[in-house]
Image: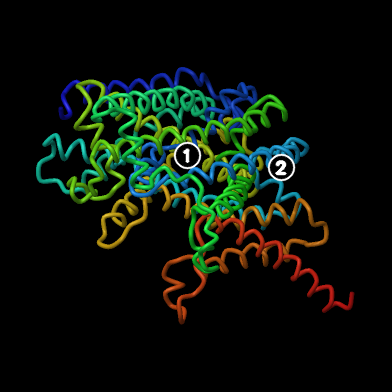
Amino acid sequence: MGFSAVDYIVIVVYLVGVAVIGIRIAGKQTSTSDYFLGGEGIPWWAVLFSVVATETSTLTFISIPAVAYGGNLTFLQITLGYIAGRVLVSLFFLPKYYEGNLTTAYQFLANRFGPAMRNATSTTFMVTRLLADGVRLFATAIPLAIILRLGGAFIGWGDLQLYLLSISAISLVTVIYTLIGGIKAVVWMDVMQMAVYIGGALLAAGIMIGGIPGGLPAAVTTAAEAGKLNFLEFGFDMSFTDFIATPYTFFTALVGGAIFSVASHGTDQLIVQRLLTTRNLENSQKALVWSGVVVALQFALFLGIGILLYAFYEAQSAEALGLVTTDEIFAKFIVEQLPAGLSGLIVAALFAAAMSSLSSSLNSLASSTTLDLYKPYFGKDNTEARDLQVSRMITIIWALILTGSAYFFALLQLQEGERPAVVELGLGIASYTYGGLLGAFVLGRWFDKPDRRDAMIGFFAGLISLLFMVEGPVQDLLPGEGLAIAWPLYTAVGSIIVVAAGNISRWTRKAWNGG
């Protein structure tokens, strides 16, 4: 069917409409409290959907179906851990934020260990967001590159050039309403855009089923025969080294997913900022716990789409379909199989997922930079108007940096050699630094004796140790095969090392000083 002029019009109208509606919803911002916390009066259900939309992004829309297309449903095991982790955060982390009336997650560490620890963890958050959201923003470029390639537009342009064009367009629209509207615009546009991309996914799934000979029963039979409906994998028949290196065994997914969720939703400013915009602790807890259930349902939906695609394309490989990576499978269906207008609507849904994630990142990065790094050292005597002006300037700077990061990952993903699914790349990056952040919070929350020196030693010990357990340049330099661990375990192992190293440091100093 191809991509028509009607589809292009739908996309342009949607992008312009998002910017205009986002600005109008937010109203006038007069302070950093309005800009970063929305006046602390956003309904819990809106925050719930904003949290889900923030962590969903285009990675879910594009790459989760690719995981099922090339594998099976074992990825879904990790959502059980996500729900368990959210429950723990609601019980043990959120009360601490509300007790201290804190506006960023890292102010808790400043109160416990001093400003140096806050600066270290806040900077780590920024690096994590820069890398992980660079991957997310790059994922957005995949469908548009296919559209332009298949539609014959920009003849002579390569995949990389088309990816860069897409990244730039999304960044420009998103920064407009984020810059002007602040967190209130971000949250309410997340709610709207979540409705758009879930509706688009359901619509695509329905059309997909209609195009499979035999419909849904035939698709299920095809998937079952290929072993793609396998949901549980315990891995008891594996060796220890294989077991800890396999990401989707039951216990690895459950424990790793829970600890990852504790870190991402209990220490990451991206999520904590949203939870603090509700009216009280109870509303924050409801928004957080129910977001885990909604995320699990979303993963099930998009994995199901991957199963349908497998049947629709008769199990062909990405190369046989003329694609660069498996991540392009769903985008190919959208462009080639949907009628005029609907393709544009679903690509707009892809952009909705991307913009909800990018806008959230921009606002949280600006919040952490302004309140944790700028305000304590350079803006103590600023007026509210000056702080708001600085916040917006910092938002623009982060938009440029994130766009550059996405450019880098676009270039990296097109290199020769085996490539992971984009979703696994993004989650792996986030998991790596979450271990240090979570360990620092646990050390400060449940251990009274360690001081600033112990916390810093533990924090960096955790980050450095993981370099030797993650497949990459450092492990390649080690003799033998080394000890590689699966990405869901990065956070668990890193946080354990931080807590252990921090306490060992305290005990060593105590023994050295004679008690």
What amino acid type is highlighted by mark number 2? Phe
Residue 22 in the figure: left or right of residue 48: left
**In-front residue for pair 315/195:** 315
x 35%, y 39%: residue: 306
**Above or below — where is 369 with respect to 466?**
above
The x, y position of residue 429, in whole percent, is 47, 54
What's the colour scheme? rainbow
**Above or below — where is 317 with respect to 41?**
below
| Residue at disc 2, secondary structure | loop
x 26%, y 59%: residue: 415
Q: Are marks 1 and 2 in contact (CB under 8 Å)?
A: no
* Res. 277 visible in picture: yes
**In-front residue for pair 335/214:** 214
The x, y position of residue 130, in whole percent, is 45, 50
Which residue is the site of mark 1? 362
The x, y position of residue 371, in whole percent, is 61, 42
**Above or below — where is 482 with respect to 232?**
below
Label 1 Cα crowd, 10 Å radius (few <14 / some 14-19 / many 20+): many
Residue 50 in the figure: left or right of residue 515: left
Quadrant hosting residue 5: top left
Quadrant hosting residue 80: top right
**In-front residue for pair 285/278:** 285
What amino acid type is highlighted by mark number 1? Leu
For marks 1 and 2, the one nearer the N-term is: 2
Residue 466 in the figure: left or right of residue 504: left
| Residue at disc 1, secondary structure | helix
Image quadrant occupied by the N terminus: top left
Which residue is the site of mark 2? 93
The x, y position of residue 155, in whole percent, is 10, 41
